[in-house]
């Protein structure tokens, strides 16, 4: 439009001015308590030493005491393990977080042990939507609708005792056709069951990682023109700028926050 060209090097030099701001943002002080925290990963293609590989950006999204969303941290590229997640959670502690009431995630490798060590009093909540998806992977198309309906009787049960009975009933009903489909529900029951302490309206605030999946889909949409990032640093710059763009829309607390906060305070 304006009749001059900008080289990749020049773009890089200009955007390098962001690096001190990114570092400051990554180390900014946080609130002492976050009622709800979500952790998830979003994957991007990055060129590393001439080879294109997938790198994960691990995003930590918090709901603060006013029910407002806040991106607490973005870390690019490490492999998942208990040691890795412990370093992520310890960095939150070093920035002032003393307690997380409920930490919601998918079955990330090593996250369970890390949470127990860093925030021993935090409730660990597995994302129910991921649990359902992972279960239905083992099910034939013709049975999916009926199976999903039966799974719903577990996670919408009035209390944990009823949910446990429904779990046994669903397992018994489908075990002949799909012997391993329900294994994860039994293995992860301790991280599925916290929702049953709360009323049905309050459960919707944290029984799924939809809030952070929505954030991750915004990151993907903002970066859809970039099929490959030239470096992990370039990816971090894009995610940092994207965070501020997305957060402009976060002007209201989450739905029913007064009720959610009230029940969380009692628990």
Image (tube, rainbow, N blue to C red):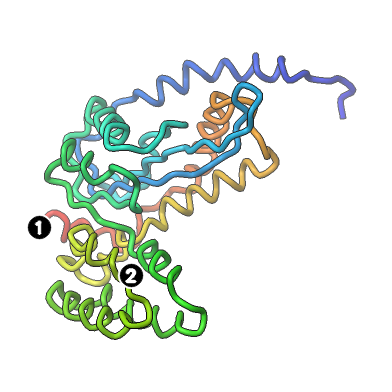
Residue drawn 16% across the image and 37% down it: 117
Where is residue 23? Give x, y as percent: 43, 20
Instruction: Describe residue 64's horizontal placement relative to residue 263 as left or right.
Output: right
The quadrant of the image that shows the N terminus is top right
Label 2 sits on a secondary structure element that is loop
Front: mark 2 or 1? 2
Where is residue 130? Give x, y as percent: 39, 61
Residue found farthest to the right: 3
In three-dimensional space, the C-alpha distance between marks 2 and 1, rounded to whole angstroms, equals: 38 Å
Residue found farthest to the left: 266
* Mark 2, other Cα within 10 Å: few <14 / some 14–19 / many ≥20: few
In the image, residue 197 sits, relative to residue 177, either above or below, namely above
**Residue 59 in view here:** yes
The label shown at residue 174 is none
Residue 128 location, quadrant: bottom left
The label shown at residue 266 is 1
The answer to which of marks 2 and 1 sits earlier in the sequence is: 2
Where is residue 228? Give x, y as percent: 66, 35
Q: Which residue is mark 2?
A: 180
Residue drawn 71% across the image and 15% down it: 9
Is 215 in front, or is 167? Answer: 167
* Mark 1, other Cα within 10 Å: few <14 / some 14–19 / many ≥20: few
Is 86 in front, or is 264? Answer: 86
Residue drawn 60% across the image and 37% down it: 45
């Amino acid at each position: 439009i304006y009749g001059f060209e900008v080289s990749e090097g020049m773009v890089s030099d200009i955007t390098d001015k962001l690096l001190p701001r990114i570092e400051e943002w990554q180390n900014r002080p946080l609130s002492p308590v976050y009622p709800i925290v979500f952790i998830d990963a979003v994957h991007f293609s990055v060129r590393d030493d001439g080879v294109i590989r997938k790198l994960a950006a691990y995003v930590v999204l918090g709901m603060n005491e006013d029910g407002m969303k806040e991106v607490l941290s973005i870390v690019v590229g490490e492999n998942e393990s208990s040691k890795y997640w412990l370093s992520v959670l310890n960095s939150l502690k070093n920035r002032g977080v003393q307690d997380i009431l409920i930490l919601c995630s998918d079955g990330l490798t090593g996250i369970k042990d890390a949470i127990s060590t860093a925030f021993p009093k935090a409730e660990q909540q597995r994302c129910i939507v991921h649990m359902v998806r992972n279960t239905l992977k083992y099910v034939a198309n013709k049975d999916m609708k009926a199976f999903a309906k039966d799974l719903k009787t577990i996670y919408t049960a009035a209390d944990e005792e009823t949910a446990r009975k429904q779990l046994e009933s669903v397992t018994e009903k489908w075990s002949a056709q799909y012997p391993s489909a329900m294994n994860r529900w039994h293995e992860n029951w301790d991280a599925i069951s916290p929702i049953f302490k709360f009323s049905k309206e309050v459960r919707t605030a944290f029984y799924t990682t939809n809030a952070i999946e929505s954030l991750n889909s915004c990151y993907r949409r903002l970066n859809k023109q970039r099929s490959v990032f030239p470096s992990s640093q370039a990816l971090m710059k894009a995610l940092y700028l994207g965070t501020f763009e997305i957060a402009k829309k976060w002007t209201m607390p989450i739905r029913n926050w007064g009720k959610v906060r009230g029940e969380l305070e009692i628990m």
